[in-house]
Image (tube, rainbow, N blue to C red):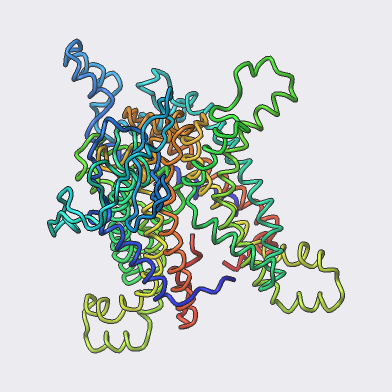
Amino acid sequence: MIRYRGWKQWLLVLAVLHGTIAAAGFLAPYDPTEQDREHPYLPPMKLHLVDSQGHFHFRPFFYALHPRDGSLDQFEESSGQVQPLGFLVSGRPYRLLGLVPSRLHLFGAQTSKIYLLGSDAYGRDQLSRILYGGQISLLAGLLGAGLTLCFGVLIGATAGYYGGWRDGLLMRLAELFVALPWLYLLLALRAFLPLSVRPVQAFFLIVLVIGAVGWARPARLVRGVVLSAKERDFVRAARGFGATDGYLLRRHILPETSSVILTQAAILVPQFVLAEMTLSFLGLGVPEPTPSWGSLLASLEQYSVLVSYWWMYLPALAIVPFFLGYLGLASALQQEISVEKIEGKTGGDVW
Amino acid sequence: MRYFLRRLIQAAFLLTGVSILTFLFSTLAPGNYFDEMRLNPQISPETVAALRAQYQLDQPLPLRYGRWVNSVLHGEMGFSFAYNSPVRPLLWTRARNTLLLTLSATLIAWALALPLGVLSAATRGRLPDRSLSWATAAALVIPDLVFALALLILAVRSGWFPTGGIVSVGFESLSPIQKFLDLASHMALPVLALVFSALPALLRHVRAAVREVLDAPFLRAAASHGIPRRILLYRYALRAAANPLISLFGFSIGALLSGSLLVEVVMSWPGLGPLLLESILARDLYVVIGGVLFSTIFLVAGNFLADIFIYWADPRIRTGKAAR
């Protein structure tokens, strides 16, 4: 088995990754919806330090691209004019984290536009779109996971604590949700919600749909923990002293479930990010021009894009480090918990 | 026999539950197929209302559900507005294609997961185990959407595999062997993508289950009696570890169905996935419900198969003294 180092390291990795996406406004040179109709499907530009005459520059620079003679989609560098890269330049205004207004960008170019990861059909900067798209996808995953865990804890605690017919009913329903293929369920739910809505509404619809699909697993796990916790001596003692149900749950029982919930969160977030990507990829997510990792990939459904413009695939790779981080975190948490020897099943297997 | 009867009743409850659930969702839907027509000035509101009445969309939910159940029992499963035909024949050809894909992928994934998992458990901590667990971790990190798209790009660029569709043009004129090869080459990519998405999780479960058994006293005794390793692993250990794995087999079909939906859309395989997507966008109500129900039927069938296997593999269930 691979040895997973402590969960704190993984948390740090994830914090850096999420921080990168959160700072999209600063890191991205352009606005994700800013079009440049003159330059569709430009390939990624290379940064140089040595120019065509062999001179060394301390400041990295690039060459603007122009179509090769007699070709429409083959580009070459116009090596005549050096385009220096500017750092901490002033550009398009944006709001950092949606709050702090700023015009400062990490890098930019003055005379010619720079496309480090190429441009799409409308000449929009792919790098900026990937960074901003990550905000939508990750936020949907995080909020969806939060929502699903809330449902899961509520339902699991009700079923486990009160038992009886509530337990029977809720757990049958949970079995139904666990059994169904989740993508079919996701699509069926999405099918019966409005199709063409504004981006913000669409975003919350998706969060709602994703959050409503996954509650069954955490609910079953929470129920198991609550079942064993409510028979513990200190809980019985507290009940004997006349503690109310609400107090018992809040003070004594739900804290016991925290490790299960944390592990489930680490498992669910990447799954839900992927769910958002899938919905957007299928055209049921946040509509254009707002980017999300899924809708960025949707252009690959065109044959010509698939054949000619490999950089359109790059958004797919953006999710891989996040998956790695969450997988590591979930495994480390599970090991931590098994070391703590908490009774009963805690997280199940990762995926 | 009572065991199977109980399972059948559970399956019936599941199917009823799913159908009621999807119907309930459908009432939440803020639009229907005929809304598009309302925007068309050439179609009068009366016509739209008449159409709605004709398809009984204006009637209360319980009544519509009753009618739908009735049409299911008559083998129609409602009516597709877009295709202007009953839903079942429409879904049937698509479901066959999905089944072809999912079944092949399930078989291949399990055929790989069992020996690799046993190998990994048997060489615990040594090179084969370590490299396999690295490989599964790497595979878990790559989402199936990303992998399927990468495969598609590879296929398009190299031209090794046909992309999209289930058979080539002129399939009918081929000889049986050519037909098989043509079908196989079309299936190769989607099946590969599905196997990739299912294999890592299966491998981990097989490894965990077998490893748990390997520590059991009866296996140590058998090993010290000098029973060959091969027989020890495959005849004794695997059989003892079979129970949770067979239940997993039922679940793996559900996971593969979800994966299949996405892979079908990406690789333009004419299965349930693209049809479902299309009917969602067109608000073709009964096709959506039928599609979800078909996927549930596959799932139920898979779990039933798993139940039969367990019945055969676990004598405790046969004698009615199941541990669980």
Is B312 located above or below residue B156 in the figure? below
Q: Residue furthest top?
A: B42
Specify whether residue A104 is in view: yes
In this orientation, which residue lies closer to the viewer: B264 or A217? Answer: B264
In terms of image quadrants, where is residue A329?
Answer: bottom left
The residue under the point 66% across, 32% down is: B184
The residue under the point 38% across, 40% down is: A79
* Residue B48 as seen in the image, left or right of residue B247: left
Is B82 located above or below residue A100 in the figure? above
Q: In x, y percent, where is residue A212?
A: 31, 52
In this orientation, which residue lies closer to the viewer: B216 or A283? Answer: A283
The residue under the point 61% across, 59% down is: B203
* Residue B70 as seen in the image, left or right of residue A242: right
Is A248 located above or below residue A266 in the figure? below
* Residue A30 as seen in the image, left or right of residue B286: left
In terms of image quadrants, where is residue B227?
Answer: bottom right
Q: In x, y percent, where is residue B181?
A: 70, 29
| The N terminus of chain A lies in quadrant | bottom right
In this orientation, which residue lies closer to the viewer: A262 or A40? Answer: A40
* Residue A267 as seen in the image, left or right of residue A207: right
Q: In x, y percent, where is residue B110?
A: 65, 51
In terms of image quadrants, where is residue B71?
Answer: top left
Specify whether residue A186 is in view: no
Q: In x, y percent, where is residue A75?
A: 41, 33
